[in-house]
Image (tube, grey):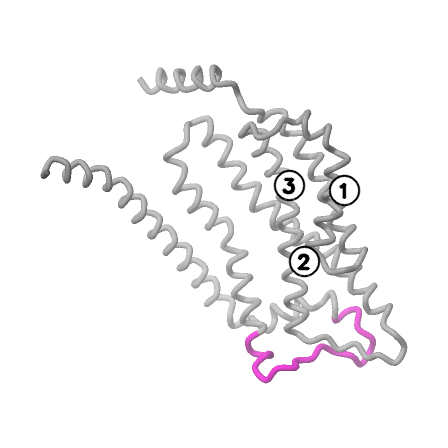
Amino acid sequence: MSESMSEQEQHSLPLITHLLELRDRILKIVVIVLVLFLGLVYFSNDIYQYIAIPLTSQLPEGSSMIATGVATPFFTPIKLTIVLSILIAIPAILYQVWAFVAPGLYKHERKLVAPLVASSAFLFYLGMVFSYYVVFPLVFSFFTSTAPEGVTIATDISSYLDFVLKLFFAFGLAFEIPVATLLLCWTGATTPDSLRAKRPYIVVAAFIFGMLLTPPDVISQTLLAVPMLILFEVGLLFARFYVKKTDQEEENNIDKESARND
């Protein structure tokens, strides 16, 4: 009985170790986000004003944004600051995830995952920058110019924040398509040739996702779908270098790594 209990304890130790490491890394992420939030919260109103520029610059003279809730002027900039703190911390969050899973990967897998983690953060930020500097001015210019005569445009600050955050995340995720394409080919789920053959379906899917992820206007839907298709082609271009290797090639790589370690 004691021997069996000892074996069970030995088997449970690695699990406990992994759980403790996971807890420590989650705590590090929370601390990083908290520190960023405390450093930015003083400037929360200024941050909101900057995010609101694409709309306020398009409003008719004499118009302004409004707050319909009593506590909205306080909580809305705070909400934006919390989200911004998390977004800024994305590289640190991805690093903690990478550090947690890296010990379980082979050397050639770590060589691939590390640049993918870095490129994922870069592409997400690129999608947000694209939405702010390209999509927002066009969308808000269209919305404000199509208002019926006699209608005063006065957007609620909370509704505006929800709108732009939705677009930020939609474009940020859409710009991850090259990474997703590489991972699909690397894991063997598909091949570049198979994806090329399905290109017409992917075009239709891009516009459907553009419709689902953006507000119900043709401009933002198209501005999301077209970059998705371009990024899909970029992913296909690089995916041919990351096609899943055969089992024999994997064994040869493992044998080579073992020989080097010896």
Q: Contact (CB < 8 A) between labels 3 and 1?
A: no
Give the mark nearer the N terminus: 3 vs 2. 2
Residue 62 is situated, as x and y percent measured from the top left of the image, at 80, 81
User: Quadrant of residue 102 in the image?
Assistant: top left
**Magenta range:** 56-75
Q: Is residue 8 left or right of residue 185?
A: left
Give the mark nearer the N terminus: 3 vs 1. 3
Residue 70 is situated, as x and y percent measured from the top left of the image, at 59, 84
Q: Which residue is mark 3?
A: 177
User: Quadrant of residue 155 in the image?
Assistant: bottom right
- Residue type at mark 2 is Leu
Residue 116 magenta-drawn? Answer: no
Q: Is residue 164 above or below residue 99?
A: below
Residue occupying the point 75% across, 56% down: 135
- Residue type at mark 3 is Ile
Query: Dot 2: what SS?
Result: helix
Mark 3 surroundings: few (<14), some (14-19) or many (≥20) residues within 10 A: many
Q: Which mark is residue 89?
A: none
Q: Contact (CB < 8 A) between labels 1 and 2?
A: no
What distance separates the C-alpha of mark 3 from that of mark 1? 15 Å
Q: Is residue 152 left or right of residue 79?
A: right
Mark closer to the observer (3, 1): 1
Residue 60 magenta-drawn? Answer: yes
- Residue type at mark 1 is Val
Residue occupying the point 47% across, 62% down: 36
State the residue in front, 163 or 132: 163
Q: Which residue is mark 2?
A: 167
Q: Residue furthest front?
A: 1
Residue 106 is situated, as x and y percent measured from the top left of the image, at 41, 28
